[in-house]
Amino acid sequence: GALASRDSSIIIVGGGGTMGSSTALHLARRGYTNVRILDVYENPSLNSAGNDLNKIAGADAVGLFGGASDDAWVAWTTDPVFMPYAHSPGKLELTSIGSAGAKHLREKYDKLISLGRSDIAWLANEDDIRQRAPHLAQADIKGWCGLYCSTGGWVAARDALNSVGYELRRLGVKTAFGTAGTFKELILSDDGKRCIGVKCIDGTEWNADLVVLAAGAWSPVLVDLKGQCTSKCWVYAHIQLTPEEADAMRGIPTMYNDTYGFFMEPHPTLNLLKLCNEFPGYTNLQKVQPFGSPKPITISVPRSHAANPSDTIPTESLDDIKRLVSKCLPHLAGRPLINQAMCWCTDTDDGQWVVCEDPRWKGLVLATGDSGHTFKMLPVVGGQVADLIEGKLSEERRQLWRWRPGVGDPLGTGRGGPPPKDLSQVPGWRHDS
Ligand code: FAD
């Protein structure tokens, strides 16, 4: 049944981020009149993984997240809140001929073709790739193959989050940011069985009929999730292009390679080119006591870039990004890599969200487990959370996103490849005392 009605008071922890702001948007649009978002920072929250120049998004992610991805690109390109931020220069997903990645991409290609898609092409070799991506003319991509999709490419992430924040205020969603919006603990009913609100770090108590925890990489630090989510950081750096260099890269398809990393069109006015390497992420193991844990536990705790602005990225990540540049864009090799930052996501062991009512406390809904690829879902993920709240989520999706400690890859990567290293093992990123 439904967990709330349209006049219930609903608090969303992490409402300045991706899953939280999307949930608030869907609830407000469905006529919920008493929704309040809490966050450390106002939208677009400086701690959100989505507070970034751009993210990959497209129309080729069919069947992801229980099929919720199928509608995402349509929403990006038809909903006025999102439309201005969706860019469709096309998308290349590349790998090495004969690799496991190639087999996976070929299966994806076959599936899209069987759905009658005409915006898809198989790129069998470097010549096929260069036809779709003239900017890779000088690139060292011998032995690469992959998939091209002419629909989609990237979204202006921070601007889209900002647009959602603006729309939330227009729709009357209430807010609390700063110390009065920073979660400290849940408030429970006298019998301890029901969550009846949230206490924030300045002592403010927000009573609520329903609390949604959508705190991204901070979720398992705030409330004990029994090992279901492992928070990790990924990294990026920018190259400042000249206007001429940026013009030469306008309209290029987004390029993702499963070994080297990815980049997309430079920012339209700032002429910044964002570069990311591909790797299993880093943890930051610390002893903490999340709400609901009887004793302190050692888990990975995000380290906010906003709170630690002198942090850069590990030397080995920087080397990876240099390798991506010299491989794909050799004319930019040796250029300064600026605006280096780590950004935090939380992985589940099976790569699916945790979107369910917490079995320990009625009135607490979990909306987390983004698994490092949920930004592309911004326009639709909150609709899934709203469906759960309204008792309308399909049985299949309830099952997929249920409370499930111990389910999945015991290494906790869910990604294949080696287990993640800890930041304490990799030098180069720390510049405070
Ligand atoms: P967030 O958006 O991080 O939101 C969590 C919110 O919780 C934040 O606003 C935070 O301030 C708030 N919060 C934390 N603690 C508290 C507290 N105590 N009280 C109140 N609020 C709190 N995805 C894609 O789809 N495509 C991509 O190309 C892509 N590229 C990426 C590249 C990098 C380098 C990284 C790091 C991620 C990338 N992602 C990409 C992943 C995507 O950004 C995340 O999956 C998504 O943004 C996570 O959404 P979330 O709502 O779970 O968390």
Image: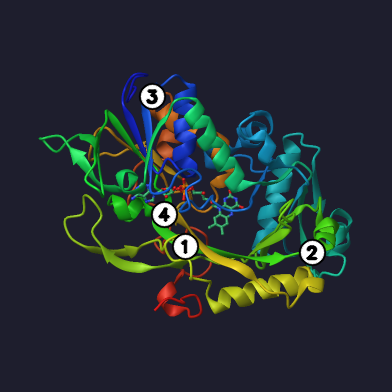
Give me the C-alpha separation between circle 3 and circle 4.
26 Å
Quickly name the residue at label 2: 242
SS class of the residue under badge 3? Answer: loop
Q: Name the N-terminal-most of marks 1 and 3.
A: 1
Q: Are marks 3 and 2 in contact (CB under 8 Å)?
A: no
| Residue, far left | 190
Tell me which label, 2 or 1, sits earlier in the chain: 2
The disc labelled 1 sits on which kind of residue? His
Check contact, mark 4 vs mark 2: CB within 8 A: no
CA–CA distance in space, label 2 to label 1: 27 Å
Q: Which of pointers 4 and 2 lies earlier in the amino acid sequence?
A: 4
- Which element carries disc 2, helix, strand or loop? loop
Residue bearing the label numbered 4: 217
> Is residue 392 something one can see in this rendering?
yes
Q: Which residue is mark 1?
A: 305
Quadrant assignment, res 113: top right
Q: Amino acid at mark 2?
A: Thr
Image coordinates for residue 431, horizontal then vertical, percent: 46, 77
Count neighbours of disc 4 (C-alpha within 10 A) and say few if under 14, some if 14 to 19, many if 20 or more: many
Please tell me whether mark 3 or mark 2 is closer to you in this view. 2
Q: Which mark is residue 391?
A: 3
Q: Please name the residue shown 35% across and 68% down the image.
A: 285
Q: Residue at x 52, y 75 (%)?
A: 314
